[in-house]
Amino acid sequence: MTDAALEPVVAAKPQAPLRRVVSDFCENRLAVFGLVLVVLSIFVAVFAPLISPQNPFDIANLDLLDAKAPPGSVSGDGKITYWLGTDGQARDMMSAIFYGMRLSLFVGFVSVLAALAIGVVVGLVAAYAGGRTDAFLMRIVDIMLSFPAILVALILLSVLGKGIDKVLIALILVQWAYFARAARGAALVERNKEYVEAATCLALPPWRIVFRHMLPNCMPSLIVIATITLARAIALEATLSFLGVGVPVTQPSLGMLISNGFEFLLSGSYWISFFPGVALAIAIVGINLAGDHLRDVLNPRNLR
Amino acid sequence: MIVYIVRRLMQAALVMVVMSILVFVGIYLIGDPVLMMISPDASELEREAVRKALHLDLPMWQQYLLFVNDALHGNFGKSFLAGQPAMGLIFERFPATLELAFMSLVISLALGLPMGVYAGLRPHAPGSKAIMTGSILGFSLPNFWVGLMLIMVFAVMLPDLIPGWPRLPASGRGATVDVLGVKLSFLTLDGLRHLLLPAITLSLYKGALIVRLARATAREVLPMDYVKFARAKGLSERRIVGVHVLKNIMIPIATVSGLEFGQTVAFAVVTETVFSWPGVGKLLIDSILLLDRPVVVAYLVIIVFFFVVLNLVVDLLYSVLDPRVRLESRAT
Amino acid sequence: MVKLGRRAAFAGALAFTGVAASGPSKAQSQELKIGIKTEPSSLDPQFHTLNPNIQVAQHFFDALVLQDENLKTKPGLALSWKTLDDTTWEFKLRPDVKFHDGSDFTAEDVVFTYERIPKVPNSPGPYTIYTRAMKSFEIVDPLTLRIHTNGPAPLLPLDLAALSILSKKAMQGPAPEGKTSAELNAGNGLVGTGPFKFVEWQRGSRIVGERNDNYWGGKPVWSKVILRPLSNNTARVAALLSGDVDMIEDPPTTDLAKLKNDPKIHLDRAVSNRVIYIHLDQHGEPSVGIPDTNGKNPLLDKRVREALSIAIDRKGIDDKIMEGVAVPAGDLLPYPMGGTRKDTAVDAYDPAKAKKLLADAGYPNGFHITLGAPNGRYINDLKIAQAVASMWSRIGVKTEVDAAAPPVFFKNRDSFKYSAYLAGWGASTGELSNALKALLATPDRPKGMGTTNSGRYSNKEMDAKLEQALVTNDDAEREGLLAEASKIAIQQDHGLIPIHFELSVWAMKKGLTYQGRADQNTLAIGVKPAA
């Protein structure tokens, strides 16, 4: 008896054709709207240099006299219209948002995906193996959970110097433990279910049981946590950059623009904080609206 | 079970040692505490004197051994900056943070759980859609911004515009009551007034997370056979949801609540700074930036112990919530 | 259908309003609540030379010599002082002064205070920097004290201004230093002669003092003073707007316009002693942050340094970044502080001339440079650095800003990793020797010279003038020497580039005024109801 005969029963992942998924997805208008927002954000991020009136990362372009100009004003030399105004350093808000979106999305996505991958592996292995392995791995998780992001970032900065890769490492180091705990929790429930027993009886190799059978059943809660953590990761990167241990100050990410804009919130130059905030919200709302429905659609057990 | 708990506590001790070593090495790698604290007017003579007084002239391993020796006698070192025992400084401020974290956890669970379950039960109702969209706002709005907006609205604008509207405090912690030597403010009305805005700010992210988790797992659980069976048996909706569905979604909720509670206690800096809440979060950040090593070491050692205990409680909760979970799984 | 939602929601709303409506009783008597930026690290006035510590100490204690708002000396617990010879100062003390516990103030308390300073253990910033010059004490009578110094010490009175006088009687204790810092932090032994008596300190929350009715300087207006640390800038402003506090120090520059237009708020300003400057690497070649000049260091050439200075639009920075709270600088202290010149010229903004100077020096196409800056240490430090970088880039000196959190910034600065860096300096003595000694004197660690001169600027002529000034007792002569030294270092050599002096701002509810101080300190005794 091959295990292939049992696969359809044991596996939880749907083998639905792409067409069905797409048509189900499109039934929900909110989700489609979300998808549009996501595509828009990604487009902006990828094509930023082509669609921005100014390269805000090149400080020779900035003329201090244009700082804090309201939306719609024209630059001193008449070359650019600042559709969304300028910030405290005279960066064109629209260009800064496009360039910053690219940085924030990149850092957010990559760090969350990597942290998720590492965390899931550790959590599932710990839950499946149990005993000493579980204890050892979970104590490492406890240590990582207690380590503040700032300390990690400061150490990395001091030892390895500046750079966006160091920010990524810091973010990954700080986030993976959270996912490990969540994955382990979900896996502990799955671990004692009949299908796992069945698979074990079949002498399936452990890695297969864990990753092809248990993992898909743990995914729903993990995906929810991951999409929310994306927002948190972007905010965390902003905090680190704010303290000087993140991205260079003259190349602000969207998160940094928002942080920089906080002090202007009550001062009347609302656009410095408002527009970047809206841009980030658009990206995150889009991801979540689309992601919510995608998850529902991909899950075969949902009532239609 | 007792063996399990005891074993976990022993592991906690090991973990605390590892953490202390990591912090010692970490701070050493970052920079020089003396530079951060000494007056810029000071000469080399004074710098050396301070270095000697704080034992920073000794090689790292010797400093660490001194620390261990003191720790075994119950002394976790004196803050470089304040000259007072680090533990004392931390414990002075801990209750404030714990209060805040606890209050925000309560608010987020009390509001988030029912809303999330409702959204899971009636996914197509307009209320559900509103809840889900609202939850997206909950975690995409930055903490800082929310706190500030709440302050501006409830402490400044509304009381100014509407005569008679109660003015909530913009900062600080309210009157406290001494309970077993610990000062707690949520037992006084004034304390609650001060707790309200910061707790609400902190509970937004958590609440959003719980709403979405509850909905997702409720949707997972509803099509299950045992729910169908319970319906067929004629059990009331309230019992089905309140007992069967709820118990099965509690595991991820418990995990996340525990993690979030831990995170808030350990790192609620932003909210604490915005509301000038005298908790430990700010103490930690300031100490890290000033390289006040004794405070950072003491703090992180306590926090790691706290996380070990917290995760132990959550693990024990797992076995209560779901008898299928066996904590003492056989090792492979 | 689960109905728990609605009922619970209603109950919640009721609870919310109930809790919110229970306000505090009307504030009575003359209480003053001040929102301060940084909490002191200790109440022991001899533990740490940290500005917040000194500021709070001045509420409860007095020194022999006080500094007025321009940092010039005025009588405190000493009525007068003079030098008897090159190494002896004599102080006549104020009679009929009582400590908060009723005991008399005499010379014994002064000697006890100064002798305790080196005994304070574990001090991260010892006050011994102020007692360095003292050799021995001589009590001539209960109200006359002679201090013998190691060599001429013309600035001794200024040093004494930083030393709060403790009560020998109240400070008795088993430890070698009498009452320990920990005991003082709890209020034990915290007895001074100052305008307010210590009541309590709740860390992170408030420091409370009550009026000293018998204060020698006149009964203070405020019966109670509450200092609340509110470190977040925006939250501090919100606390003022909501009435949580009556006055705040250091409102963020971005809120100034709004506060100015608010009819319920009043602002007071004063030029401070803090200069924001840029130091340039003048040590040798090549310079670590300038990679593209074939191993040469352009900063060694005076013309390049001048070019970098005149490329900075100081007025633009004042307008756009500092919102008007900066005074463009051409020296290390504003006139009329000790050693400054009335006609000091501030380098005028002239990018065309800057480019020409660069070309003359052999860099027609400019070069790359990295500007180091701390993040969050000085007002708008990061923004100023970015603005400077952008201005330098426009004359061809392509600048990258390397901003770092203070611990990393200091580490890098002291290991000479920056070719140029932005920093600030506040001369606590209110006269120029303090700044020249630290920032421009040829570095000589053991002698305490050039301790913050990481650009390693060195001019022997300037050094000579400075050293002579430090041992000149005659005020006019000394200040003349300092003026000459500063002219050589800054106007002639462009040894460092001063950008501006910070203008300190205090925001308070209408009906109060504050005589702003150049050392940026906020003292309750200086807050008065508007006439």
Image: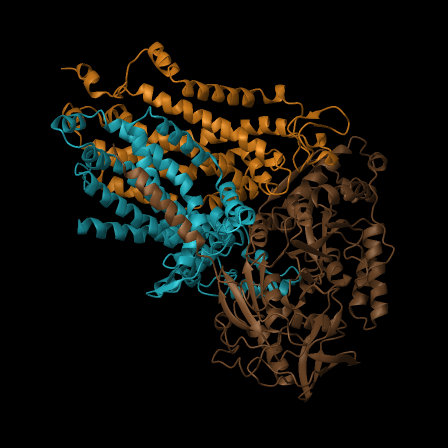
Residue B34 in the image, given as x and y percentages of width and height: 56, 58
> Going by the picture, which residue comes out furthest to the left?
B233
Q: Which residue lies at the image location 50% right of the left edge and 57% below the top edge?
A: B292
Task: Name the foreground residue: A79 vs B291.
Answer: A79
How many numbered callouts? 0
Q: Quadrant of the C terminus of chain B?
A: top left
> Going by the picture, which residue comes out furthest to the right?
C343
Q: Colour of chain A?
A: orange
- State whether residue A181 appears in this view: no
How is this picture coloured? by chain
Horizontal arrangement in the rendering, residue B38 relative to residue C398 (left or right): left
- State whether residue C489 appears in this view: yes
Horizontal arrangement in the rendering, residue C465 relative to residue A279 (left or right): right
Q: Which residue lies at the image location 57% right of the left edge and 41% below the top edge?
A: A262
Q: Which chain is cyan?
A: B
Residue C337 in the image, given as x and y percentages of width and height: 79, 62
Task: Name which quarter of the figure residue C248 lies in.
Answer: bottom right
> Going by the picture, which residue comes out furthest to the front?
B163
Horizontal arrangement in the rendering, residue C476 relative to residue B43 (left or right): right
Q: Is residue C10 above or below residue A33?
A: below
Q: Which residue lies at the image location 39% right of the left edge and 14% below the top edge?
A: A26
Q: Colour of chain C?
A: brown
Residue B103 in the image, given as x and y percentages of width and height: 37, 49
Task: Name which quarter of the figure residue C5 lies in.
Answer: top left
Residue B267 in the image, given as x and y percentages of width and height: 43, 47
Task: Name the foreground residue: C8 vs C209.
Answer: C8
Task: Name the foreground residue: B216 vs B116.
Answer: B116
